[in-house]
Image (spheres, grey):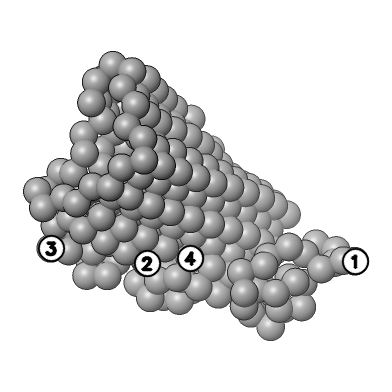
């Protein structure tokens, strides 16, 4: 698709490796179901394309180095989608700049692989890419939002991540710089240990974790700015959230954080 096309209310099976390629500028793929691919299901390239209100599921059943959704280009928006079940990552952000990923429900990545994220990138300059208001949940192996080695300039805020039993909701490896994490809520997660590539320093200059509620301990680089974060176990979390077992992470009345 190229140059202001609009694909609406469709159903797509993909038995190739790439799925739909939405390139060019100002295109929209919306209100559709994309399913059952050996590789990816949809790739956005070019500029200012939009992926809106789709049901995207069951990608990468070969366990290759692909994602259900791949964002590559500038100014793309992925919003109000349900994205679930993939052999590896669900959303790959490695080649996106100045993008917006918001109000998505993202679950069950890593059905076949390890060392991955529901949303994943590495060696990438996000150029202000914003990840906000997403619900990220349920995996025995995947991190939530995973900014791997040499990633910079991502803004991550107001996301809820829960039931990531073996990994963390907000994973950021070194070296990296100027990634901002604020006002996120994590529940029932494993601890996060920042890792650097061999022969590279454990540094994350300009990165900030502010005002997050975290479900376990976070080990980070010494040059990260860390302020007003709350780290709690599940028992304490149960005492402040209304009904975390059912996915209700609103604070109880009178709760002071």
Separation of marks 3 and 4 at Cα, in angstroms: 22 Å
Q: Residues within 10 Å of mark 2 (few under 14, many from 20)?
A: many
Say if mark 3 contacts mark 2, CB within 8 Å: no
- Which numbered circle lies on residue 108? 2
Q: Which residue is mark 4?
A: 137
Residue 131 location (% of width, % of height): 50, 42
Residue 120 visible here: no
Q: Secondary structure at mark 1?
A: loop
- Which circle's residue, 3 or 4, is located before the other in the chain? 3
Q: Quadrant of the C terminus?
A: bottom right
Foreground of the two, 129 or 243: 243
Marks 2 and 1, how far apart in space? 34 Å
Q: Residues within 10 Å of mark 4 (few under 14, many from 20)?
A: many
Of pointers 4 and 2, the one earlier in the residue sequence: 2
The quadrant in which the N terminus is found is top left
Q: Report how far apart the C-alphas of labels 1 and 4 lie in the structure.
A: 27 Å
Residue ID for mark 1: 254
Question: Please, what secondary structure does the residue beneath circle 4 have?
Answer: strand
Q: Which one is nearer the viewer's eye here, 183 or 133?
A: 133
Sooner in the amino-acid sequence: mark 3 or mark 2:
3
The outermost residue toward the front is 9
């Amino acid at each position: 698709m190229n140059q202001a096309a609009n694909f609406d209310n469709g159903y797509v099976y993909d038995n190739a490796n790439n799925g739909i390629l939405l390139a060019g500028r100002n295109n929209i793929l919306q209100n559709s179901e994309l399913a059952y691919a050996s590789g990816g299901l949809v790739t956005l390239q070019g500029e200012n394309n939009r992926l809106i209100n789709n049901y995207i599921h069951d990608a990468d059943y070969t366990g290759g180095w692909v994602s259900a959704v791949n964002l590559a280009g500038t100014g793309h928006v992925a919003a109000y989608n349900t994205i679930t079940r993939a052999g590896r990552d669900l959303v790959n952000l490695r080649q996106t700049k100045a993008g917006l990923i918001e109000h998505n429900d993202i679950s069950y990545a890593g059905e076949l692989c390890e060392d991955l994220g529901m949303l994943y990138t590495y060696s990438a300059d996000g150029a202000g890419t914003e990840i906000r208001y997403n619900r990220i949940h349920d995996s025995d192996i995947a991190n939530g939002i995973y900014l791997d080695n040499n990633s910079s300039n991502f803004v991550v805020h107001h996301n809820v991540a829960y039931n990531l039993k073996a990994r963390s909701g907000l994973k950021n490896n070194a070296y990296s710089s100027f990634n901002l994490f604020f006002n996120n809520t994590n529940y029932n997660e494993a601890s996060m240990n920042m890792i650097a590539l061999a022969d590279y320093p454990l540094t994350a200059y300009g990165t900030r974790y502010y005002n997050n509620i975290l479900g376990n301990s976070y080990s980070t680089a010494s040059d990260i700015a860390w302020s007003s974060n709350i780290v709690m176990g599940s028992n304490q979390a149960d005492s402040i959230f209304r009904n975390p077992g059912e996915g209700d992470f609103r604070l109880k009345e009178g709760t002071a954080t």
